[in-house]
Image: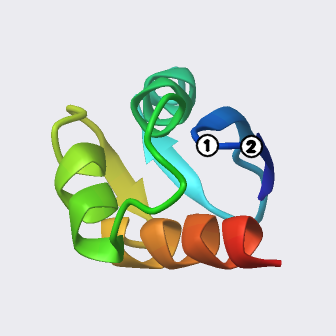
């Protein structure tokens, strides 16, 4: 997970050992995270991630939201 941010999350790249169905859903997941305020709660991120029509294999919306929060808080 890589993220750039100031007051909002400007850019996100999701990487790692996981699968998505459909594979092109990764770009949609990145887009739903981008633009979120840096103070967005984990639950708000989970809710946003769950709006994407994708099957996450090897990780969950909760895992992804946690990774985003960790990247922003570093």
**Residue 40 visible (yes or no):** yes
Left or right relative to 12: residue 69: left
Q: Nearer the viewer, mark 2 or mark 1?
A: 1
On screen, 14 above or below 8? below
Residue underneath mark 1? 7
Residue underneath mark 2? 5
Question: Which residue is the extreme one toward the front?
Answer: 7
Q: Quadrant of the C terminus?
A: bottom right
The image position of residue 23, as x and y in percent, is 53, 30
Query: How much space separates mark 2 and mark 1, taking CA atoms?
Result: 6 Å
Left or right relative to 3: residue 56: left
Residue drawn 35% across and 74% down? 42
Q: Quadrant of the N terminus?
A: bottom right
For label 2, the SS is strand
**Residue 58 visible (yes or no):** no
The image position of residue 39, as x and y in percent, is 45, 62
Q: Quadrant of residue 46?
A: bottom left
Left or right relative to 68: residue 31: left
**Which residue is nearer to you in this view: 26 or 11?**
11
The image position of residue 27, as x and y in percent, is 56, 22
Residue drawn 39% across and 31% down? 32
Residue drawn 37% across and 71% down? 60
The image position of residue 5, as x and y in percent, is 74, 43
Q: Are marks 2 and 1 in contact (CB under 8 Å)?
A: yes
Dot 2 surroundings within 10 Å: few (below 14), some, or many (20 or more)?
some
Q: Quadrant of residue 6?
A: top right
For label 1, the SS is loop
Number of marks drawn:
2
């Amino acid at each position: 997970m890589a993220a750039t941010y100031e007051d909002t999350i400007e850019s996100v790249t999701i990487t790692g050992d996981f699968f998505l169905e459909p594979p092109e859903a990764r770009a949609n997941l990145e887009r739903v995270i981008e633009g979120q305020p840096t103070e967005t709660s984990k639950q708000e991120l989970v809710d946003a991630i769950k709006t994407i029509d994708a099957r996450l294999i090897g990780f969950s919306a909760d895992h992804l939201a946690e990774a985003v929060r960790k990247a922003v808080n570093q």
